[in-house]
Image: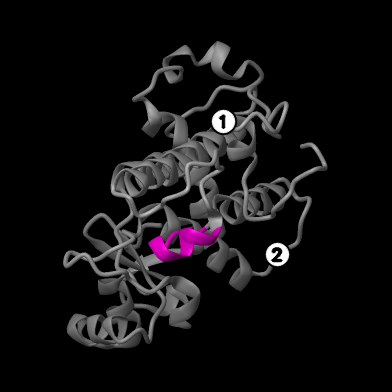
Amino acid sequence: MESKRRDAKVSSIELYRAGLLGSPPYDMTDPLDIAIFAAMQGYVDLLERLDVARRQKGEEKSEAANLYRHEDITDLNLRPAGFLEDAAFRLKKWNSGGLDLGSEDLFETARSLLDAFFSPARNLRGRLVPWGYGDYHVDRTLWEAGEEILTGERKVGGGDGLLELAQWDAAHHFRALLAPFYALLIRALGGLITQAEVARRLDLTPRAVAVRVNRGEMRHLRIGGSVLIPESDVGVPKESSRSAGTKT
């Protein structure tokens, strides 16, 4: 990446689109780089759509060319793309052994990315949702595609990138393309178990676990219609539980 990055909030994708960067720092022969690039593209697309809509409604009076106004993104309750890109690169570096991150840092970094990609900016009443408090559900198909890579059920090409995986080179084939990135996020999140398994390990009713989740007393992720909880938060060894039927 070029060193003249004027704002840490601005991603290389945005700078490239604005003609301010010769080439983004992605290796298009690496499936993980391609996946992160595509994930960031989708997020930047969202920022652009919202910026255009705001200008058309007359909420933004300036006609000056912009890299949309990042000082206004907080009004939309969206994170600047540069922060998300940096977080994805940190996980990538950790995954390759180039960065030492603790389990808490890994979990929160991965969860913040999922939060940004899947949280609506506003609730059903049209009101802004405070950052980090909005309910969201991670796309189950994307999650399962990442799991398939971790278990070896899904193979990714190496060495020839898009040239080898020509089926990825289409506008609406993003699920297959994003799978390596979701495999990285799942690995960073560590072991996740269902509410039912948490109830078995802690000798609680499923209702009691659900109440704790809703109160914010247990960290959790919503994958499709399921709620998964970090296994490390339960604190009971798997082998001592009455059932070992878990799936991460």
Q: Is residue 128 left or right of residue 125?
A: right
- Amino acid type for the residue under numbered disc 1: Ile
First to last magenta residue range: 71-79
Q: Which residue is mark 1?
A: 34
Q: Give the residue at x 43% y 38%.
A: 45
Q: Is residue 173 left or right of residue 102?
A: left
For mark 1, give the secondary structure: helix
- Please tell me whether mark 2 or mark 1 is closer to you in this view: 1
Whole-Å distance between the Cαs marked 2 and 1?
23 Å
Asked whether 202 falls inside the magenta stretch, the response is no
- Residue 43 position in % (x across, y down): 45, 44
Quadrant location of residue 154?
top left
Q: Give the residue at x 56% y 58%.
A: 188
- Residue 101 - label: 2
Q: In which quadrant of the rendered image does the N terminus lie?
A: top right
Dot 1 crowding, Cα within 10 Å, few <14, some 14–19, many 20+: many
- 234 relative to 55, above or below: below
Q: Give the residue at x 42% y 34%.
A: 153
Between 61 and 151, which is closer to the camera in this rendering? 61
